[in-house]
Amino acid sequence: EEAKDLSQEAFLRAFIHLKGFDRRAGFYTWFYRILLNVCLDYRRRRGRVVWESLDQKANGGDDGPGVASELATPDQEAISGEISRRVGEALQALPARQRTAFILKNHQGLSIQQIAEVMQTADGTVKAHLHRAVTALRQRLAEFI
């Protein structure tokens, strides 16, 4: 429900500020920046964000953490849940800019240039954030790699 409210707020802000849209920039990155700002504003008001699996939500919700096979044993499900929990903790431990760059690149599939536009920074800075995020995640999740 909160995600729907935030999406609606982002669309409303985009509609209100459509006249201020610079047509030289991409609409996707402009709107994504609005959506990111809405989410950051919400986070500041509410405090810490708890990451949830979108796949899990789409598949009906309460299947346990992550994606589990119908044939998975309880041990396999426990291991899968532990891995999901640890990955979530590792992502939360990243500095905000590194986490944002990592999620935009690896979860949303944005290019370096698109991420730079969304984050309002240089391409090289995005690459540095991504490199540092991957290095930190590898260190924190070394036992699973």
Image (cartoon, rainbow, N blue to C red):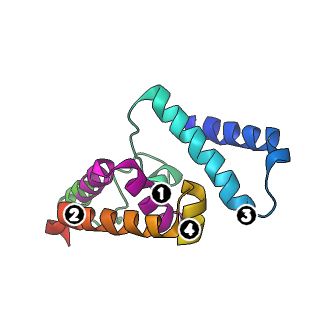
SS class, disc 3: loop
Judge by depth and name the residue closer to the eye, 31 or 132. 132
Q: Earlier in the sequence, mark 4 or mark 2?
A: 2
Instruction: Give the labeled residue for mark 3.
Output: 26
Instruction: Give the labeled residue for mark 4.
Output: 110
Residues shaded magenta: 83-108
Instruction: Give the labeled residue for mark 2.
Output: 76
The residue that appears at 38% across and 67% down in the rendered structure is: 128
Instruction: Give the labeled residue for mark 1.
Output: 55
Q: Earlier in the sequence, mark 4 or mark 3?
A: 3
Judge by depth and name the residue closer to the eye, 12 or 65. 12
Residue lying furthest top:
45
Q: Position of residue 96 (x, y in %)?
A: 39, 48
Q: Position of residue 105 (x, y in %)?
A: 48, 67
Q: Position of residue 122 (x, y in %)?
A: 52, 64
SS class, disc 4: loop
The residue that appears at 49% across and 26% down in the rendered structure is: 45
User: Alpha-carbon distance for marks 2 and 1?
Assistant: 19 Å
Name the residue type under label 2. Answer: Gln
